Amino acid sequence: MLEEPTGDLNQIPTTIPHWYDPDGSPLTLESGDGATVFDDDGEEYLDFASQLYCVNAGHGNQQIIDAMTEQLEQIQYVSSSKHSPVRSELGERLVDIAPGDLSHVMFSVTGSEANELAVQLARKHTGGSKILTRWRSYHGSTYGAGSLTGDPETRALVESHAATTGSTKFLPPMSHPSPFNADSPEELAELAADHLEFVIRNEDPDSIAGIMMEPVAGSSGGYPAPPGYFERVRELCDKYDILLIADEVITGFGRCGEWFGIETEDVEPDMITFAKGVTSSYAPLAGVLARPEHVSGVQEDGFDLGQTFGGHPVGCAAGLAAIDVYEDGQIDNVRENASLFEDGLAELESQYDVVADARGRGYLWGVAFEDPATGEPFYDPRVDGDDVENPVSDVVSGLEDRGVLVGTGRPATQILLSPPLCTTAEEIETVLDALDAAITDAF
Ligand code: PLP
């Protein structure tokens, strides 16, 4: 027999912080304007994480808000079995800005679901089942996407709960800390691509449907691939009939100075998955850009892979307006100011022996910290658990005390700088000075 619940149910908190702050309560953010957000005491912070690398157009953008309001007033929702002009218009716009002949768009709601959709399309098209992804990568946290993820903590949790999607991991082309003993970026590209071919051959190429990668690593540390790496990956995909899926959930929509991060690599992917920046996070929206032949098999078989809120009209209206905003100067702004990050972070790297590596592209940068005495990161959550103090978290809180929010990497031995695309040169200089001071205080 069911027992009556006891206790005062009103005492159960109605808001549960999603992000756990070991030092106290999480910051309560109440409003925002451009690259700045304000807390409940009116304190202002430069949002150099764009929250979760997603508020690309900046906070409080009236053009996007107006477009969403107009859509809401017209019709708030149209199911995927009916025609919605705003959805078609966004689809066409995405195809226009996408590289190569990615002429089909399928919408979903989150980045995790977009990646799972890409997996389904790749499996259907190739007849293979396995998807290869990089160790330490992040592709989402739902059961399917979580097992694509190479970040050990996310992956371990998901796999302790569920059967996996059959994803095999390979070593990333990271320069620091590097799993390869290379003397130059070019050699790193060759060694990492040779390793990938070794994995492909050992997994049985016919069993592999796709290789999924972020063009510039996001939460695993902001590192771009060494020159020539993606060309080799493209060659391997062609040689073994495997689809190349670019996870552009973070790197898309101007974040790295182009519409999509893969454009810098001079290769055409078979699919691009997108989310976050497509609406600048004014509404949840995600999807897959694919070649026609990769979608047709699914359509011919009459599979309906859609979701109720996939391609929601209000999200589509936000997407169209956000793309206008990026086009009208924000991507140019990233291109003009990206070198400030490159130069400023290189200076910190040469100034502090705890700064082991600073890398990135456009407005997506990672700073990795290391103990100079051991040459190792200060903390490895998988090995050290919660027992070891991580001084990198002092850099993060020192920045917050100075009015700057940054992202913490996976693992949290690095920080990520990824501001809205409207961020000015002056704001970047302010944050670099604050970082300098926070590092001095923390070590
Ligand atoms: N792919 C990448 C590269 C991401 O960074 C993320 C989320 O941070 C995802 C996929 C998953 O997106 P979502 O959190 O919208 O499911």
Image (cartoon, rainbow, N blue to C red):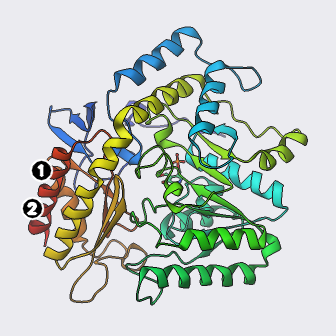
Q: Is residue 404 left or right of residue 316?
A: left
Residue found farthest to the right: 301
Task: Write down the quadrant of residue 285 in the picture.
Answer: top right
Q: Is mark 1 within 8 Å of ligand 1?
A: no
**Residue nearest the viewer, comparing 405 with 143:** 405
The x, y position of residue 368, in whole percent, is: 30, 71
Image quadrant containing the C terminus: bottom left
Q: Quadrant of residue 299?
A: top right
**Could you tell me residue 279's position as x and y percent?**
48, 34
The residue pinned by badge 2 equals: 437
Q: Is 57 drawn above or below residue 225 in the view shown?
A: above
Q: Which numbered tag is attached to residue 402?
A: 1
| Residue for point 60% across, 66% down | 160
Determine the image quadrant of residue 409. Answer: bottom left
Labels 1 & 2 near each other (Cβ < 8 A): yes
Which label number is shown at residue 5? none
Which residue corresponds to the image point at 51% horizontal and 75% vertical from the top-left? Answer: 172
Which structural element holds mark 2? helix
N-term mark: 1 or 2? 1
Can residue 49 be seen from the camera position used here? no
Location of the N terminus by quadrant is top right
* 175, 258: nearer the viewer: 258
